[in-house]
Image (tube, rainbow, N blue to C red):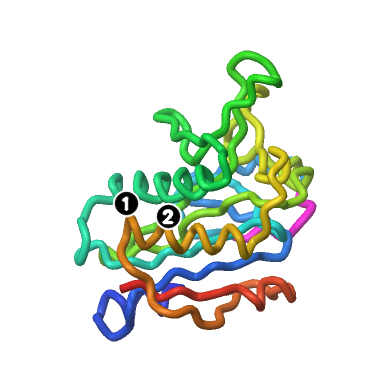
Amino acid sequence: MDSRAAQIAAGTAPELVWLLEHPPLYTAGTSSNPADLIEARFPVHTSGRGGQLTYHGPGQRVAYVMLDLRRRSPDVRRFVATLEEWIIRTLAAFNVRAERREDRIGVWVRRTEKGEGHEDKIAAIGVRVKHWVTLHGIALNIDPDLSHFSGIVPCGVRERRYGVTSLVDLGIPATLAEVDMILRREFEQLFGRAADQMVGSTENVSPSPRARRSASVPSS
């Protein structure tokens, strides 16, 4: 990822979005608190992204977004807000009303059936910007094993009324392929038209068979 970002910054490679599916693991962002690691059920990888501890695994779509903000808008807050909007629009296509929160990063779904004020996170966001090129990106829960989140305090959010969810947990049996199609469509609406897909892989971990089938989507 760092190598590709350096090439993008130098103008020797096009922007790129990697769509991946990791084997089970935890990643620790630059603001992570060791006390939030409750049980190291899976490997813990230190990450240069912003944010705290999160989980990645099968059934979750990870998108590493490498864009040159100098070509767009050198505004990191705007970029993060656009990532949130990308997720919100994608989920709307599946009739899920997802929302951003000023005091909590990521994208959330209200769970009134669990009680007043209850909300679950359906997508996490963690980015890094180097020479105005973005790294890392989003993780959208489609059908992961939600019990795997119990080994950490996801993103440092400890209040019991805030949990995690997925499309399947919400009763929507979506597939990765179906979500990818919408992600690509909404990405183009927000960031510009994407080029043809090509094969990608996970980085710095041993990819699962599902990860080897992930797509890499260069953007214009």
Q: CA distance from mark 2 to mark 1?
A: 10 Å
Between marks 2 and 1 in the image, the one whose residue lies nearer the viewer: 1
Q: Where does the image place residue 133, in percent across and percent down from the top left?
A: 31, 66
From the viewer's perspective, tell me whether residue 179 is left or right of residue 18: right
Residue in view at x 40 percent, y 59 percent: 187
Number of other residues with Cα within 10 Å of mark 2, as a class: few under 14, some 14 to 19, many 20 or more: many
From the viewer's perspective, tell me whether residue 28 is left or right of residue 165: left
Residue 38 to residue 82: above or below: above
Q: Which residues are magenta?
A: 40-45
Three-letter code for the amino acid on which mark 1 is drawn: Phe
Q: Secondary structure at mark 1?
A: helix
Per the image, the residue denoted by label 1 is: 79
Residue 181 to residue 220: above or below: above
Disc assigned to residue 167: none
- Residue lying furthest bottom: 12
Q: Where does the image place residue 111, in percent across and percent down from the top left?
A: 64, 25
Q: Look at the image and tell me in which quarter the C terminus lies.
A: bottom left
Residue in view at x 55 percent, y 63 percent: 180
Q: Where does the image place residue 82, in percent across and percent down from the top left?
A: 35, 49
Are discs 2 and 1 less than 8 Å apart at CB? yes
**Nearer to us in this view, 42 or 160:** 160
Q: Which of the 4 image quarters holds residue 189?
A: bottom left
Asked if one can make out residue 124 in the rendered structure from this viewpoint, the answer is no
Q: Is residue 163 magenta?
A: no
Per the image, the residue denoted by label 2 is: 127
